[in-house]
Amino acid sequence: MRSDLIYQLALTMVPNIGTVQAKILLQHCEAEEIFHAKRSFLEKIEGIGPVRADAIARFRDFSLAEEEIRFMEKHHITAVFLTDPAYPKRLLNCYDSPTLLFMKGEPDLNASRMAAIIGTRSNTEYGRQQTEKIVEALAAAKVTIVSGLAYGIDAIAHKSSLKNEIPTIGVLAHGLDQVYPPAHNGMAKEMCRTGGGLLSEFRCGTKPDKHNFPSRNRIVAGMTDATIVIETGEKGGSIITAELANNYNRDVFALPGKVTDHKSAGCNNLIRSNKAALLTEPAQLIELMGWEEKTQKPGRASQRELFIELSPEERIIVDLLKEKETLPIDELNYLSGLSSSGVAGALLNLELQSVVLSLPGKQYRLA
């Protein structure tokens, strides 16, 4: 049994230590070192203090972590810790990113293109048709689809992804010992078999209680490049997810509906308040996100580089974009190892020299 995983799990169980405090602690030491550190050291860390330091020092329930690991091994569940390379890098840059994620299947949580498709549980035929149309277009652009496995728009997005043979990830508001709603159990298994999977921050035995869904929604919003709202009322989970995506500086799109249709009232409000871009055609979404196929001749950017003297920082950025094609600013900061100001300066110079293009959603690609 992995000792590092025992301590990583234990960190999520300590009273008064939430995701923000865990991230603070991990900036100072590894998970195991946290539990062996002196109380006097821990309480001096800004944001921890004596009460949280005492909670860590008194923690003894490591057997619960061991029990969780046994369950994971039995049911082929993988744990993805905050410091793991497989952890969603887009989500990592959110201030409240989960300390630990549980995963079934083998989805790429850092796929180059990821979009969330969300909406009401009681969709109309219009909502179904538009969801299928959007997923079909995104499949051609090789976009991974993320949603919440709920009835309605979520399920349509997942089923359409399976039909179009692209990975799709369901983010759950409960433990991976169950699928909610149970009617989607077969679909969930198919998602895991076809390059997608299930993701949750909740341990086994956690029920799909109402207060877990907003936590789930922040993962959907944070791990994707764009959030697409198909149909939703004025209140509810889709509105919460769209608000979170805005707070994380992600692009938000909403499908407009008739002003008399209460199932589109939330979408219309998002558009009216400039919290979402009006979406009428999938091609518009693909163009705004910079996901269309490149038409330039191969080697064009490389030829331009021959006549430009790049700084070491600029060379790092260019090499990353050659490898990944399109990257958001958060991921460039993470992958480059440079300071945020260093990345910003290098990108500005590269844009001025027409080596790099700036795309909506703070994304960049080679010109």
Image: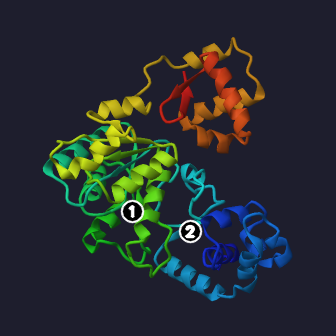
110 left or right of 134 in image: right
Residue 366 seen in this snapshot: yes
Residue 21's disc number: none
361 left or right of 40 in image: left
The quadrant in which the C terminus is found is: top right
The quadrant in which the N terminus is found is: bottom right
For the residue labelled by badge 1, is the local secondary structure a helix, a strand or a loop? Answer: helix
318 left or right of 219 in image: right
**Residue 252 or residue 336, whichever sits in front:** 252
Looking at the image, is 97 positioned above or below residue 275?
below
**Displayed quadrant of residue 39:** bottom right
Q: Which residue is mark 2?
A: 79
Q: CA distance from mark 2 to mark 1?
A: 15 Å
Instruction: Work out whether mark 2 precedes mark 1 in sequence or the reverse, and give the earlier one.
Output: 2
Residue 192's disc number: 1
For the residue labelled by badge 2, is the local secondary structure a helix, a strand or a loop? Answer: strand
